Amino acid sequence: MTASAASVCYDLNGRVFGVDAPRPELWRDFEAMLGSLRLAAPAKPGFRLSISETQSLDEAPEGSLAFDGEVPLDGHCRMIDAGSALHLIFPGRQAAAIHAADAKAEIRVLAGARVLWTLGMLALDAALDAGSQHMLHTAGLTLPDRDGVILIHAPSGTGKSTTSLALTSQGFGLCSDDAMIVDAASSAPLAWGLPRAAKIHRNTAAMLPFVLPCLGGQWDGNGEQAVSLERLKEIIRIEDAGARPVAALLHLARAADGQTRLIPMATTDAMVALAADNVRTGMTGLLAMQKRRMATIAALVKAVPTFTLEVGASPADAAALILAALAR
């Protein structure tokens, strides 16, 4: 590291994630997501990410090709499973190597570039995995009447954010509208929210006009706006990143008849639905990290009540149904 190099540490629910880079701009996406978790004083990382700039990349490491194709936002990449290391390569751009056994990762970028979103999230996933935690594509909300959090999952575009915001109008607190970290190592799974901005669709704003004071005038190509949690605090309760016991898992679906209902869901069905949206297979089958993610999902659905939440014309109606079901 040079005299201008810098480092930072983040607290991932007791697991310290350290990032080293030659200049702070290289980790700005981490800071945008994890800034509120940044440690004020240096600490020994449980997992360390080193970012470096280079003039050339090793694009042909030894190992088995696990993936070769396009990824959202960042384009074409290849994944190489080398057993002791997992490589993700964006040809001519940058590359990452994850060394799970050594609790470390490396990202190499061409000089002047910024770290691609996909590589940053892979490193964050590896840091969480090293602490027996896994990021799941779910929304998370605290209950209004007791300590505990419900997880709501569904493929993108189904209405997680709309349903989550509707529930906050009924006394629930928002942990995250899209990404929750789950620790199912004990018999009582815990979850906490990744403290990043929420994305609000223009259709959500039309359905829930109480969010309008937080919005600007510009919508992106998907008809969404990113709204900071600080801004949302002005109208709803935003929870801190503390881990809380998971009270229930809800699979979100759209009601065909416009009526909102909550239906018990078989554990096996819940596991299949959650895994379908969170566990990725490659040309070589499940990677080691994905196997551990699957084990976390299995432990989660075994430990908590599971439901299908069919949301109709009034998502806020789900609040009373959820509280009644959990009271039983």
Image: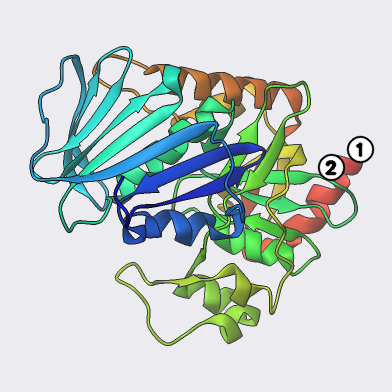
324 and 153: which is toward the camera: 153
Q: Secondary structure at mark 2?
A: helix
> How many numbered marks does the figure carry?
2
- In the rendered image, residue 14, in percent from the top left (x then y), is placed at 67, 38
Residue at the image position 71 percent from the left and 57 percent from the top: 240
Q: CA distance from mark 1 to mark 2?
A: 5 Å
**Residue 59, horizontal then vertical, whole percent:** 11, 30
Q: Residue visible at 54% across and 70% down?
A: 228
Is residue 258 visible to us here? no
Q: Please, is residue 6 above or below residue 48 in the view?
A: below
Other-residue count near label 2 (Cα within 10 Å), few / some / many at <14 / 14–19 / ≥20: some
Residue beneath disc 2: 325
Q: Work out whether residue 268 or residue 303 is closer to the camera in this orientation and state it.
A: 303
> Are there few (<14), some (14-19), or many (20+) residues within 10 Å of tag 1?
few
Which residue of the protein is positioned furthest toward the front in this rendering?
Answer: 3
Locate residue 98: give its quadrant: top left
Q: Quadrant of the N terminus?
A: top left
Residue type pointed to by label 2: Ala
Residue 133 badge: none
Write the residue at 68% across / 22% down.
Answer: 185
* Residue 131 visible, this orientation: yes
Q: Amino acid at mark 1?
A: Arg
Specify the quadrant that holds the C terminus.
top right
Q: Position of residue 316 (x, y in %)?
A: 72, 64
Q: Are marks 1 and 2 in contact (CB under 8 Å)?
A: yes
The front one of 54 and 156 is 54
Q: Is residue 327 left or right of residue 303?
A: right
Question: SS of the residue at dot 1?
Answer: loop
Residue sitting at x 64%, y 59%: 164
- Would you name the residue on which mark 1 appears? 328
Is residue 320 placed above or below 147 in the rendered structure? below
